[in-house]
Structure formats: C-alpha cells, structure tokens
Image: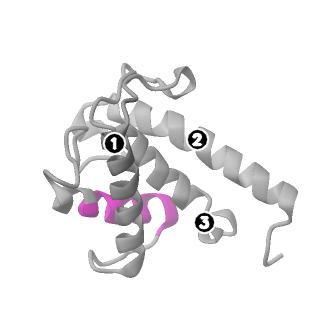
C-alpha cells in the first residue's frame, strides 16, 4: 500500500495526536539526563531564546522516532523547526495556560511558555509521516 484511505488517515492522525500529547508531557516530566525524546531542551527554550537547542532536539527526534540521521540544515529539520516556531508564536498571541487534562503527565500540567504544545505538534507531525507509518 502506498497511500492511506480516509479511514486509515483519520486513525493515523488521531493516534499521532494522542501519543504525542502524553509522550511529550511524560518525557518532560523526567530529569533532563533521563529523557529519551527531549534531552537537548528545557521547557523554557523558545525560538527567541534558544533556537539552536530546538533544532538540535528536532534532529535528535528524527533519529529517535524515525531512525533518520539528518544534518541541522536539512529541509526536514527546517520544516519541523518552522512548525515549532509557528505553534509557539500562536501561543504568544493567545493565552492558554494549563494543558488539557488528557495531555497532562508526570507532573507536567501547565504550558506557560507554550513549548509543550509546540513539541507536541512536532512529535505529532513526525508520527503521522508516511516514513513512520510505513517503516
């Protein structure tokens, strides 16, 4: 199969959103040295304060989730970084605060910097990619 029908696509999208929601909060609830997904960043790292750390962690996620070794200037890293920055910017323009109940895990329940949601979007993007679904 080289494409998803509408039902399979909807299931993949929903599962990528749900898994990214809990996995992101759960991993950030661990000490930095124990994190599997986010060892290169803190929740305070934003596109304004530490873009290099964000890009480094995106590169790490491509390896961790998809088994892809990418360079920091790879177009896929650029796309994922832009998604992170766009979601983060949306959070700066709106006031959201606490995470939805279903996305709270391991002591992470608020998102004042809007970085948890930004990372959730990046992880969801990766988990819903063709490479992940068909690997």
Helix, strand or loop for disc 2 = helix
Could you say where residue 60 lies in the image, as x and y percent from the top left?
A: 33, 61
Instruction: Indicate whether 2 appears above or below 66.
Output: below
**Residue on which disc 3 sits:** 129
Q: CA distance from mark 3 to mark 2?
A: 14 Å
Could you say where residue 97 lies in the image, as x and y percent from the top left?
A: 36, 25
Q: State left or right for residue 89 relative to residue 49.
A: right
Question: Which residue is depicted at the point 53% across and 58% down?
Answer: 125
Front one among 100 and 40: 100
Helix, strand or loop for disc 1 = helix
Q: Main secondary structure of the magenta part?
A: helix
Question: Which residue is depicted at the point 34% across and 80% down?
Answer: 74
Q: State left or right for residue 39 relative to residue 37.
A: left
**Residue on which disc 1 sits:** 93
Residue 19, numbered circle:
2
Q: Earlier in the sequence, mark 1 or mark 3?
A: 1
What's the magenta region?
Answer: 55-67
């Amino acid at each position: 199969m080289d494409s998803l029908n509408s039902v399979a696509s909807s299931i993949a999208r929903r599962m990528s959103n749900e898994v990214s929601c809990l996995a992101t909060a759960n991993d950030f609830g661990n000490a930095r040295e124990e994190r599997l997904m986010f060892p290169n960043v803190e929740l305070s790292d934003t596109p304004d304060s530490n873009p290099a750390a964000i890009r480094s962690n995106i590169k790490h996620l491509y390896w961790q989730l998809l088994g892809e070794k990418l360079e920091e200037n790879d177009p896929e890293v650029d796309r994922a970084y832009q998604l992170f920055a766009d979601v983060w910017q949306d959070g700066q323009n709106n006031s959201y605060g606490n995470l939805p109940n279903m996305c709270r895990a391991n002591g992470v329940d608020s998102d004042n910097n809007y970085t948890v949601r930004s990372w959730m979007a990046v992880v969801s993007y990766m988990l819903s990619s063709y490479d992940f679904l068909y690997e």
